[in-house]
Image (spheres, grey):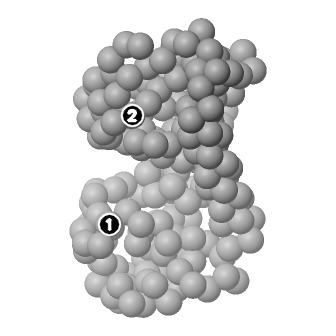
Amino acid sequence: MSRLSCPAGFVLFRPGQECPGFVRLTAGRIKVTLTAANGREVVLYRVGPGDVCLQTFACLTDGRTYAAEGVAETALEGEIIPHAAFREAMSEDGTFRSEVLTAVARRFADYEQLVEDVALTGFDARLARVLLRLSQGGDEIRITHDALAAETASGRAFVTRRLREFARLGLVETQRGHLRILDRAGLERMAQDEG
């Protein structure tokens, strides 16, 4: 095993790169995104301590290269388990195998939620859910419209239009590079709307 320690903003992997091994985080969070040829980006998931990166799992179990990008959203601490040691632990260590497969199952549930949100949930509800999640209980969110577009699997111009409507309704106040939640209860009601 080798130690992993890197600052926020560090790019851990990009499309086409080989996988160095299985990452086990003890602190921090990785944001995994997919970018289309037209430059549009979507956040697939985030990886924290106890989570599995499906991109890495696929690389290790199926011999693929990365198809997405992983960036340290915060400073990271952890370890990298080399390919051979990962395969050995998966075949011989029942506890390790159970932890990994349980984390993979949780990650698939996240994917199911992403598909449901994008395909079956109205955009305003999806945007409200993202704003509530990103606020982490506070009122200030430092984020650009581009980043919100990636979080909601949509386009920046559409996010801007909907945020203007949210502001008109008194739900949020927007400023360059951040926004403030003014009516959390209203956002929570909007987040519950499935249409």
Residue in the foreground of this view, choosing between 45 and 100? 100
Q: Quadrant of residue 77?
A: top left
Which residue appears at 40% of the width and 42% of the height?
Answer: 49
Q: Where is residue 18 in the image (x, y as percent from the top left)?
A: 59, 12
Amino acid type of the residue tagged 1 in the rendering: Gln
Q: Position of residue 116 (x, y in %)?
A: 71, 65
Which quadrant of the rendered structure holds the N terminus? Answer: top left
Q: In which quarter of the image is residue 110?
A: bottom right
**Is 146 above or below relative to 163?**
above
Of callouts 1 and 2, the N-terminal one? 2
Amino acid type of the residue tagged 2 in the rendering: Leu
Q: In which quarter of the image is residue 91?
A: top right
Of circles 1 and 2, the one toward us is 2
Which quadrant of the rendered structure holds the C terminus? Answer: bottom right
Residue picked out by circle 2: 25
Residue in the foreground of this view, choosing between 9 and 29? 29
Q: Where is residue 126 in the image (x, y as percent from the top left)?
A: 57, 71
Q: Can the viewer see residue 83?
A: no
Q: Can the viewer see residue 119?
A: yes
Q: Position of residue 95 (x, y in %)?
A: 56, 35
The secondary element bearing badge 1 is classed as loop
Residue picked out by circle 1: 136
Which residue appears at 37% of the width and 63% of the height?
Answer: 134
Which residue appears at 43% of the width and 51% of the height?
Answer: 147
- On screen, residue 188 versus residue 18, left or right, reads left
| Real-space CA distance between mark 1 and mark 2, rounded to the nearest whole angstrom | 21 Å
